[in-house]
């Protein structure tokens, strides 16, 4: 793995999987009803105290996207194969989660489909997609930036879950006790899953 990517504008850069992901996700999104799309993008409940985290998170996401456009994909069969496999897994999770999201009543929390196993399957899927692109570039600095971005994203996830608790009350609290925040912790005990 390289520490820093060889930045250049090229036809075989990491923009390829990024654009493919965007076409699939936004294409699917446009098949949803307008009120579902609005709910999907609604971040109005995030408290103002999280504004600095939101700004840093969005800035690091934009920086990562720019680096993807300028970072060549490694022409290395194992790296490309591993990255491609993870990309397919990640996008499959995102699509499945989005379909569950679209079928949920507008005034209720999403608790069906992959949401039975993770409170945030879209975030898990997106994380796997971004990780896969970092792997395809075979660059350590992009992986480090991705990890920083995920730490910031986790703080926003905590805020969103607090807002869901306020909005949906006891049923959402019970849901939180049964379902872990991320898939990876599904194997752990009930008490641990509530917090992770």
Image (cartoon, rainbow, N blue to C red):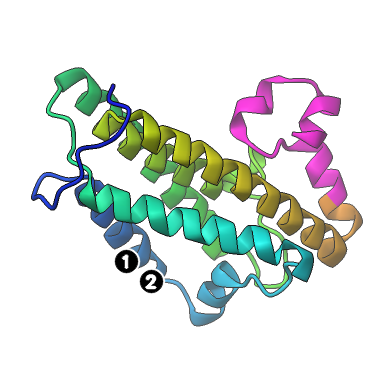
CB-based contact (under 8 Å), mark 2 and mark 1? yes
Q: What residue do we see at 83% from left, 38% from top? A: 177
Residue 130: give x, y in percent of width and height. Answer: 39, 42
Q: Residue furthest bottom?
A: 34
Q: Depth check: 52 or 20 in front?
A: 52
In the rendered image, residue 51 lying in the magenta stretch gets the answer no
Residue farthest toward the left in the current orientation of the protein: 11
- Horizontally, is 151 left or right of 78 in the view? right
**Count of numbered marks:** 2
Q: Residue at x 38, y 38 (%)?
A: 142
44 left or right of 125?
Answer: right
Residue 54, above or below 148: below
Instruction: From the viewer's perspective, tell me whether residue 39 is left or right of residue 98.
Output: right
- Residue that numbered label 2 is attached to: 31
Left or right: where 84 falls relative to 159: left
- Tell me the magenta residue range: 173-196
Q: Quadrant of the C terminus?
A: top right
Quick one: SS at disc 2?
loop
Between residue 69 and residue 166, name the one nearer to us.
69
Task: Give 147 or 131, whichever is nearer the viewer.
Answer: 147
- Residue 186 position in % (x across, y down): 67, 27
CA gap between label 2 and label 1 equals 7 Å
- Location of the N terminus by quadrant is top left
Residue 181 included in the magenta stretch of the image: yes
The residue carrying pointer 1 sits among few (fewer than 14), some (14 to 19) or many (20 or more) residues within 10 Å by Cα, namely few
Q: Position of residue 98 (x, y in %)?
A: 49, 56
User: Is the magenta region chiefly helix, strand or loop?
Assistant: helix
Q: Which residue is mark 1?
A: 27
Question: Percent position (x, y) of residue 77?
Answer: 15, 21
Q: Residue at x 86, y 27 (%)?
A: 191
Disc 1 is placed on an element classified as: helix
Which label belongs to residue 65? none
């Amino acid at each position: 793995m390289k520490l820093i990517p060889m930045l250049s504008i090229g036809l075989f850069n990491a923009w390829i999987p990024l654009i493919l992901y965007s076409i699939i996700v936004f294409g699917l999104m446009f098949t949803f009803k307008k009120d579902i799309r609005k709910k999907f993008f609604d971040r109005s409940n995030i408290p103002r105290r999280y504004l600095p985290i939101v700004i840093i998170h969005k800035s690091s996401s934009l920086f990562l996207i720019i680096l993807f456009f300028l970072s060549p994909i490694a022409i290395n069969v194992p790296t490309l194969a591993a990255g491609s496999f993870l990309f397919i897994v990640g996008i499959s999770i995102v699509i499945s989660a989005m379909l569950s999201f679209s079928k949920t009543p507008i005034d209720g929390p999403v608790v069906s489909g992959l949401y039975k196993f993770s409170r945030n399957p879209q975030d898990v899927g997106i994380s796997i997609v971004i990780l896969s692109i970092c792997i395809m570039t075979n660059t350590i600095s992009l992986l480090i930036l991705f990890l920083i971005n995920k730490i910031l994203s986790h703080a926003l996830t905590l805020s969103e879950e607090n807002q869901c608790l306020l909005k949906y009350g006891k049923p959402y609290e019970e849901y939180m006790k049964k379902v872990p925040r991320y898939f990876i912790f599904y194997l752990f005990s009930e008490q641990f899953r509530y917090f992770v």
